[in-house]
Image (tube, helix red, strand yellow):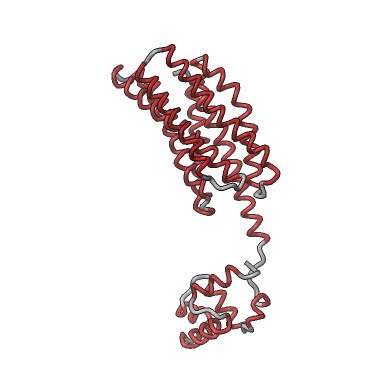
Amino acid sequence: MNGLLLFTYTTSIAVACMALALSIASHILHRTAWSGRYIVFQSCLIGIMVLFMAAKLSLFFLPESISVMINYIFETVTMASMAFVIVFLPYFLSWVIAKPWGRRQTLRFYPVAFSYFGLGLASQIVNDPSFGFWVRLIQTLMVLGVYAYCIVTLWVNLKSIEDPAARHIALAINIVSLSLIPLSIFALFYEIVADFSYPIYVFAFSVVIVVYNYIRFDLDRQEIENKPELSFESLSKFKISEREFTVVQLICEGLTNKEIANQLNISVNTVNNHVANIFSKMGVRSRIDLLKELKEGPWA
């Protein structure tokens, strides 16, 4: 394993880990349907690269039988991940263009993914160079076919994408996908290119995800900065007094009635009366209902 290949893999792993960390943070904040699957996918990519490095290094430090086993595990996990890509890319596409994933997509892409994985297993069992070449050729055409479908669908629906972050990532994925097609073709014929191609794929798409998450976080920041704050005037229609508004603010901060009493230097009974008046004026029965009303109001 030469130094350049090792550097390429370690750099790709570092960027992929950054993309994974940002994706976890984004998933916690937004809970989008695709982000949970992406976290699993990205974790698999990182694991595969670690397995690849282990497989290469095992040739020098471990017995041949163990090295062969590690290489077999690496190839199997890689095929499984690529089969996942065949389903994940159009699934992610359906979120980007805001068109629900339906039965038609399931019947269209799942058979292709299973065929990809099945052909790879057959190639490992047969272990014939000529058969292996044709299997790799068919698998490459499968992946390129899915890429082509996603790219064309993205371009057709690009203007209809309302989410700015989603539109940016759609453009980035188009550009990255098109630029990596020649690499996929060369990797089919040259083993050294194939070794370098995998970390380059992961690096490129990890950079796209990192940029997307930074754009998403920046949009969140702008939304928070531009969001109007809850004010005394915004609750004027409920005829809330200034003291009651102060109590509302402290409730929003999560303080209990006793803590509010200590904060305002008044008795707990007085706080209870204020809270009861607030509930009556705003037509709610509990703190949860109050917070929901405040969250869904015109100032939210």
The foreground one among 48 and 222 is: 48
Where residue 79 sits in the image (x, y, percent)? 43, 28
Viewer-closest of 80 and 74: 80
User: Above or below — where is 154 with respect to 298?
Assistant: above
Task: Place residue 184 in its image quadrant.
Answer: top right
Question: Which quarter shows the N terminus?
Answer: top left
Q: Residue at x 63, y 28 (%)?
A: 178
Q: Is residue 39 visible?
A: yes
**Quadrant of image for the C terminus:** bottom right
Residue 53 visible in the current orientation: no
Picture layout, residue 216 above or below residue 43: below
Residue displayed at 68% across by 38% down:
156
- Residue nearer the viewer, 183 or 46: 183
- The quadrant in which residue 48 appears is top left
* Residue at 54% from the left image edge and 36% from the top image edge: 206
Image height check: is 199 above or below 266? above
* Percent position of residue 115, x then y: 44, 28
Residue 265 horizontal side relative to residue 175, left or right: left
Q: Where residue 40 sits: x, y (%)?
A: 44, 41
- Please name the residue shown 40% across and 30% down the image: 77
